[in-house]
Amino acid sequence: MQTKKLDDTITVSHQIAIEDVKAIRDQGFTLLMCNRPDGEDPGQPNWEDMKAAAEAVGLKTAFLPMSSREDALALKDPFRAEMEGADGPVFAYCRTGTRCEILWTLAMS
């Protein structure tokens, strides 16, 4: 996994595999957030499967898919609410991690 720690509350990543979920939990994250719409690429794990894997190991989940500037602006407040409501560090992913970082920047401004 290629990760980027933005601050003590959030780390972002490129697309993860379902097999990565337990390791994410084991690293101390409490919330798994997906900022990527389902179906962008063939073979991409869908959110329902990722959510089931995360909840099976005790992670809370959030699905805030972003595919446009308008989505980013609309998701600013929901992203902030998820961050503020998290019981610990958040692990967010999308295709490359960039959308997660954009949402975090918007939400924290």
Image (spheres, grey):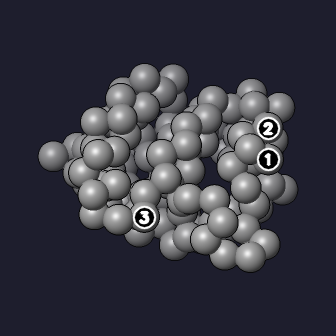
Question: Could you tell me which secondary element the residue under label 2 belongs to?
Answer: helix
Instruction: Indicate the position of residue 25 as horizontal and vertical percent values.
Output: 70, 40
Q: Which badge, 1 or 3, comes first in the chain's sequence?
A: 1
Instruction: Indicate the position of residue 24 as horizontal and vertical percent values.
Output: 69, 47
Q: In this rendering, which labeled residue sits more in front, label 1 or label 3?
A: 3
Q: In this view, does 20 lie to the left or right of 105?
A: right
Count the numbered circles shown.
3
User: Residue lying farthest left?
Assistant: 109
Return the residue at label 1: 49
Q: Does the CB distance between marks 1 and 2 fall below 8 Å?
A: yes
Q: Is residue 86 left or right of residue 1?
A: left
Instruction: Indicate the position of residue 82 as horizontal and vertical percent values.
Output: 42, 32
Pick the front one: 93 or 66 = 66
Going by the numbered disc 3, the residue's amino acid type is Ser
Q: Which quadrant of the structure image shows residue 54?
A: top right
Question: Could you tell me which secondary element the residue under label 3 belongs to?
Answer: loop
Q: Give the spatial CA distance, label 1 vs label 2.
A: 5 Å
